[in-house]
Amino acid sequence: NHYQHTPRLVITSPTPECGKTNTFKCVRLLAFNPETSMSITTAQLSRDMDTGGTIIVDEAEHIFGDHGRVDIIKGGFDKYATKRIHKDTFQLFGPMAIGGVDRVPGAIASRALNIHIFKSEHPEDFITISPDDPKMSAPFQQAQTLIAAWVEKGHLNLRPEMPDGMKGGRYRDKWLPLISIADSFGVEWGKSARKAALSTINDTSDLVIQAKLLLDFETIFNDRDVRYIRK
């Protein structure tokens, strides 16, 4: 509640079996009051977001055809977003992690930190996270303890200096909380966060597919140094 916006975390892959579900197990073990769903109605999504916890939606490609759910997900980015269902009004603001195959709608991606993962050439090198395994969950519990201690004692600068190119707009909105938090851990963490933020400015992952296609065409024309291509 310290910030005006909270970015979505979006993890996508080109095909199934790339590790998204395993990644979300890690997110769940670290998130505040996590609520996981793989198939969720508009009403249930609104109620869950109203609890103020962290909403985790895996296999989200199955719900993006519903504009109502897309509007709720993108609306939760803003502190004052609400959803009225019949006589009830739900507060939508809060953290959310979303995973799916291929792409998420541009309206969500532009409000998110976008991570695209691929299937490993050596899947045998990875282990499946088992939250019920005490030995496997112990590092996450230690991290939770450290996070709780930071929440109690950490000092936040709610108006951190933003990098050039991020003085306004949605890039600023979604990166400001992360830079603010990084600054609370020291100068070097703040520098790393700003470097990471700047590296995403030219990232096209939050563009709608039509815009990305045009950029690809532009690259082809520039590489060939031509104005048109014959059949």
Image (cartoon, helix red, strand yellow):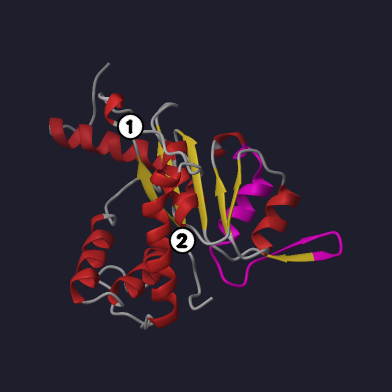
Q: Which label number is shown at residue 103? A: none
Asked if residue 154 is among those painted magenta in the image, a careful observer would answer no
Q: Residue at x 44, y 75 (%)?
A: 151
Horizontal side of 201 relative to 101 (left or right) equals left
Quadrant containing the C terminus is top left
Which stretch did the figure color magenta?
A: 63-88
97 up-or-down from 149: above or below: above
Residue 175 in picture, x, y percent from top left: 37, 66
Could you classify mark 2 by the number of other residues whose Cα lies within 10 Å: few (under 14), some (14-19), or many (20 or more)?
many
User: Of label 2 and label 1, which has the lower sequence position?
Assistant: 2
Residue 184 in picture, x, y percent from top left: 31, 77
Which kind of residue does numbered mark 2 sit on?
Answer: Pro
Query: Which residue carries the number 2 mark?
Result: 7
Which kind of residue does numbered mark 1 sit on?
Answer: Phe
Q: Residue at x 43, y 48 (%)?
A: 137
Residue 172 in picture, x, y percent from top left: 37, 69
Q: Residue at x 28, y 57 (%)?
A: 201
Picture quadrant of residue 165: bottom left
Query: Which residue carries the number 1 mark?
Result: 118
Distance Cα–Cα, label 2 vs label 1? 23 Å
